[in-house]
């Protein structure tokens, strides 16, 4: 394989091997692939696929390495690291950006910010655009511009045969359909993405905190308002237990408009929050400015591009890897009082004095729901909000998926949920991940997979 590639092939014991194969979640540090091929070109990716197929070696593609289940790696596999494929070409006149398959979220955003162009992405700066897009791609401007996959207009994919193909609405349209929400790792290794981007003039960032004793009333008010708010507004609700501080409930997010416009929209919430019987704690945290300035706050870093890389790999990077578990539900009907009470009680019951845990409620609706469920592989178009539960508890290297707090809360909320979940919040404990991730689109996705990968070469525990 080394003789076929431009980039290096690293094995255990090589100086850079561990830093190269480490995934974002330290839970998976004990997974050791047979080798990692650091790809410098599309032909490198093709060489990896052809070599692995010829020698019967399993392949795992790695871009950002943020898979909740660590699916970017596997013991005995060849990790195909596409992170060096990170070129970014912005065509502002055409409203397009083309990126390499290993590009990270923060880097594509940093290329768009100065030109006041927007692309809906997640908030994790070191998340790979590949996995984000292929699984859907939810973020703080998705209610305005749709999921990341909705903006995709073309992709280049290396198939199991080793062939590199272009797919779009006219060329291999079935594969193009499947890439928009079918999940990473199922159809090939994507080496480039082209997206439609949108002009964005200004933005407002806001956050309000309420007394914890009003948490249930705040959540109930939020769920009746946020999924139906104007598309330009994404107001998330967080219930978190902070070490040394106790539980906190807040509503915050992003608005593509002015503070005055936001104030008028937030007034729609006032009658509902009046039921909470209390005003926010302290002064609401609000900032406003050009889109390029505000959007920097919407990545989980300080917004400085160099800082928003992994400290382990970049001398200027300030993002540290983390150790956590997560589970999630999609909610399609208003959550009953019993469900809200269960969430509040669970956060109150968190008793780890050193670690963080909580619940993130992200509103859907808007442009997300304006797309038909079968128009792309991303089927979850009738969702009110997602409910993601996080626990930062597992020791490094621990692969066991169970966590009593997390699983208890998941089971308690299950009767109130739709039975589906966001495929980018990979959950190895799902009894029927096919139905949970893809619903009615599963049959068509299976057909696409059988057509482009008939031997099941691209295999992993939750493949289609």
Image: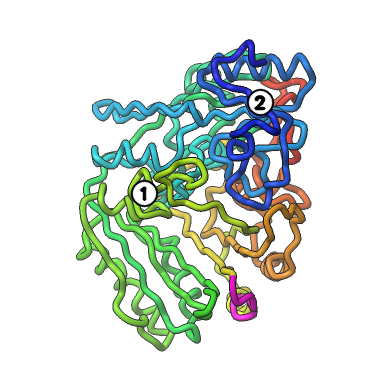
| Residue at left offset 62%, top offset 45% | 67
- Left or right, 338 with respect to 172, comes to right
Q: Nearer the viewer, residue 48 or 318?
A: 318
Residue 222 drawn at (x, y percent): 45, 70
The answer to whether residue 150 is above or below residue 416 is above
Main SS of the magenta segment?
loop
- Left or right, 396 with respect to 332, comes to right
**Residue picked out by circle 1:** 144
- Left or right, 250 with respect to 189, comes to left
**Quadrant of the snapshot with the N terminus:** top right
User: Which mark is first along the chain, 2 or 1?
Assistant: 1
The answer to whether residue 380 is above or below residue 222 is above
| Residue at left offset 62%, top offset 64% | 391
Q: Nearer the viewer, residue 292 or 268?
A: 292
Give me the disc on residue 448. Answer: 2
The answer to whether residue 90 is above or below residue 5 is below
| Residue at left offset 46%, top offset 43% | 147
Q: Nearer the viewer, residue 243 or 2?
A: 2
What stretch of residues is rendered in magenta? Answer: 347-354
Say whether residue 77 is magenta: no
């Amino acid at each position: 394989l080394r003789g076929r590639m431009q980039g290096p092939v690293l094995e255990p014991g090589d100086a850079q091997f561990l830093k190269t194969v480490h995934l974002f979640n330290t839970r998976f540090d004990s997974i050791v692939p047979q080798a990692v091929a650091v790809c410098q070109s599309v032909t490198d990716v093709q060489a990896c696929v052809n070599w692995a197929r010829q020698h019967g070696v399993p392949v795992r593609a790695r871009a950002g390495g943020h898979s909740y289940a660590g699916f970017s790696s596997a013991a005995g596999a060849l990790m195909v690291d596409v992170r060096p494929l990170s070129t970014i070409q912005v065509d502002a006149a055409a409203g397009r950006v083309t990126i390499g398959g290993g590009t990270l979220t923060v880097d594509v955003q940093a290329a768009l910010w100065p030109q006041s162009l927007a692309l809906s992405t997640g908030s994790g700066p070191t998340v790979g655009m590949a996995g984000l897009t292929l699984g859907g791609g939810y973020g703080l401007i998705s209610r305005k511009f749709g999921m990341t996959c909705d903006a995709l207009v073309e992709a280049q994919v290396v198939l199991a045969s080793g062939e590199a193909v272009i797919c779009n609405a006219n060329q291999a349209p079935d594969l193009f359909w499947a890439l928009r929400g079918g999940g990473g790792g199922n159809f090939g290794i994507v080496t480039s993405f082209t997206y439609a981007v949108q002009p964005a003039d200004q933005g407002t960032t806001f956050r309000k905190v309420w007394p914890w004793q009003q948490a249930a009333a705040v959540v109930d008010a939020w769920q009746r308002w946020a999924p139906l708010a104007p598309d330009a507004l994404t107001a998330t609700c967080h219930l978190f237990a902070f070490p040394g501080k106790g539980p906190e409930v807040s509503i915050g997010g992003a608005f593509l408009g002015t503070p005055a416009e936001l104030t008028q929209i937030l007034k729609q919430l006032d009658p509902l929050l009046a039921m909470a019987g209390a005003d926010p704690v302290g002064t609401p945290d609000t900032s406003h400015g050009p889109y390029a300035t505000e959007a920097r706050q919407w990545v989980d870093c300080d917004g400085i591009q160099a800082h928003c890389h992994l400290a382990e790999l970049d001398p200027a990077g300030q993002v540290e890897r983390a150790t956590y578990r997560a589970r999630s539900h999609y909610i399609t009907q208003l959550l009953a009082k019993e469900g809200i009470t269960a969430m509040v009680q669970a956060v109150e019951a968190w008793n780890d004095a050193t670690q963080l845990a909580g619940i993130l409620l992200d509103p859907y609706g808007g442009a997300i729901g304006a797309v038909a469920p079968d128009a792309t592989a991303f089927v979850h178009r009738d969702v009110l909000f997602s409910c993601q539960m996080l626990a930062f508890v597992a020791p490094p290297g621990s692969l066991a998926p169970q966590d009593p707090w997390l699983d208890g809360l998941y089971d308690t909320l299950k009767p109130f949920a739709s039975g589906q979940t966001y495929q980018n919040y990979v959950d190895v404990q799902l009894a029927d991940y096919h139905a949970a991730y893809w619903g009615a689109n599963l049959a068509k996705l299976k057909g696409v997979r059988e057509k482009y990968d008939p031997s099941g070469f691209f295999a992993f525990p939750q493949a289609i």
